[in-house]
Amino acid sequence: MTLRLDDVTLTYPDGDQRLTALDHVSLTAEPGTLTAIVGPSGSGKSSLLAVAATLITPDSGRVLLGGRDLAGLTSSDTATVRREQIGIIFQSSNLLASLTARDQLLVVAHMGGHDLTVASERATELLDAVGLADQADKRPHQLSGGQRQRVTIARGLMNQPSLLLVDEPTSALDTHRGEEILNLLRRLTTDRGLTTVMVTHNKEHLGSADRVTEIVDGKTRQLANW
Ligand SMILES: Nc1ncnc2c1ncn2[C@@H]1O[C@H](COP(=O)(O)OP(=O)(O)OP(=O)(O)O)[C@@H](O)[C@H]1O
């Protein structure tokens, strides 16, 4: 599904004033494409992801998913959209220490009230897709950082989202493992027709992106050559 942010402004309380985190931001991300968001610390990248994830309602402007304006939805409908259509891969992956890779995925299906037989097949398929078919019974401490990030990505895809939001997927990884994760995200985006929006600090990763949007002081601009 296409994600569209249309003239979105978001402010936070800042003493007795307001701090503008997103300043009339517009952005369109299409299915099967990977959009990278770059910008200095504090420029509004995480705020942009949080708005796209429906976790924060902007002060003004519209967020549309598949042409549907999310502002008109009740909070319970918004939660349903988030659960069924949006996969979120945030920096602190929050894998549960006591669960195997496979159970990290199944717990998502369990919370979503999904048929567990279908979920089990899906977990097997996803662990295979991220290259962890033979690591399914390992717990987080038995996996490398790159493998843990793969589990997080597979978990983010468990509910078959159409929009995948990713915050700094390689921040804890060395260059080689980071590249592998980028390649994986690129492949999953293409193969599954995902609309992927990824925040990254790493300029070397931009080659994998279809579009690169820079954000500075809450204002976006699309970079030339993308
Ligand atoms: N909950 C909040 N309350 C008040 N101000 C906030 C809040 N969250 C973020 N901010 C401020 O909004 C601005 C944008 O923050 P945001 O986290 O979106 O930037 P960022 O580009 O993701 O930064 P980083 O790269 O450091 O994670 C910053 O000035 C930040 O201090």
Image (spheres, grey):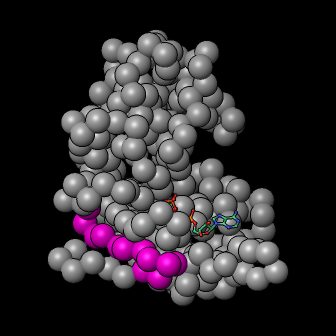
Dividing the picture into quarters, in which one does residue 148 lie?
top left
Judged from this view, the residue extending furthest toward the right is 16
Q: Residue at x 17, y 77 (%)?
A: 225
Q: Residue at x 49, y 16 (%)?
A: 141
Quadrant (top left, top right, bottom left, bottom right) of the N terminus: bottom left
Judged from this view, the residue extending furthest toward the front is 15
Residue 60: % across, % down: 66, 85
Q: Residue at x 47, y 35 (%)?
A: 152
Q: Is residue 212 visible in this depiction of the protein? A: yes
Q: Does residue 108 sit above or below 91 in this rendering?
A: above
Q: Does residue 26 sit above or below 94 in this rendering?
A: below
In the drawing, does residue 17 fall left or right of residue 95? Answer: right
Q: Is residue 117 visible in this depiction of the protein? A: no
Total tally of numbered discs in the picture: 0
Residue 162: % across, % down: 46, 56
Who is closer to the viewer here, 61 or 68?
61
Quadrant (top left, top right, bottom left, bottom right) of the C terminus: bottom left
Identify the magenta region. 208-220
The answer to if 119 sits in the magenta stretch is no
Q: Quadrant of ligand 1?
A: bottom right
Residue 138: % across, % down: 45, 13
The kind of secondary structure the magenta stretch mainly shows is strand
Who is closer to the viewer here, 56 or 162?
56
Dividing the picture into quarters, in which one does residue 68 lie?
bottom right
Q: Residue at x 21, y 36 (%)?
A: 176
